[in-house]
Image: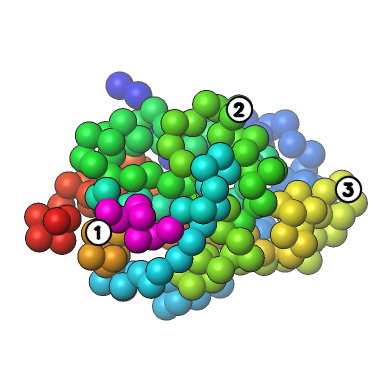
Amino acid sequence: MAQSLNQVLAAFQATRALTMPAEKLKINVDQRRLLVETADRSAFVKVGDVVQPFELTEVDAGPLSLATILKNGPLVLIFFRFAGCPACNIALPYYNQHLAPELRKLGATLVGVSPQVPEKLRDIKDRHQLDFQIATDADNSLGRRFGILYSFDEPSRRASIEAGSPIGEVTGTGTWELPMPTAIVVDQAGTVRFADVSPDWLVRTEPADIIAAVRAIPARAAA
């Protein structure tokens, strides 16, 4: 039996805890703990919310609108941080294998979303040969609407500057903001049917939960 996504991520973290310099590990752990403790969950996107029109930029296909996607079936959005994020490079290939094929059978569209600019974001799609869409959320506008953004804390900012890789340069956005890992299922009426936000980026939504949410969409909402 295949390991769950979160088992794979836990094994990754256990290995990294043995190999990462202690001071860098502490910054990483402290930032994730801070987010878990302080995230404003009341602002998170919720089941029953109606999603207003938006447009993303798919790294290969260009403009991608909510209306266009929903003509074909339900939408599953997977928000992730950026192409070089180690946990994202575990989660997205896992979704490619364990989530994307089932969603295709159900007539749903899967889109991975990051604020990173298309020319930088394309790397993760190409590297893992992802066969679902990967799109840029310019200026974090959709992530902000969904209440899922966070900013680097001061130790994380200092560390990234010292390493020569401030996140605004890595993403091309010029800011310290990133989305928390989030999975959202939207029916064809534009209503959120499932929403799972994880302030800890080493915890991600399991494919089975997303698939179950898509399968549970009433026929009238999928028509």
Relative to residue 20, is residue 101 drawn left or right?
left
Q: Does residue 42 belong to the magenta stretch?
A: no
Part of the protein shown in magenta: 65-71
Relative to residue 31, is residue 63 drawn left or right?
left
| Residue pictured at 43% horizontal, 58% vertical | 65
Which of 86/146 is in front? 146
Q: Main secondary structure of the magenta part?
A: helix
Q: Quadrant of the C terminus?
A: bottom left
| Residue pictured at 63% horizontal, 65% vertical | 139
Label 2 is placed on what type of residue? Arg
Q: Which residue is mark 2?
A: 127
- N-term-proximal mark, 3 vs 1: 3
Res. 187 mark: 1
Q: Is residue 36 above or below residue 91?
A: below
Q: Secondary structure at mark 3?
A: loop
Res. 164 mark: 3
Number of dots carrying numbers: 3
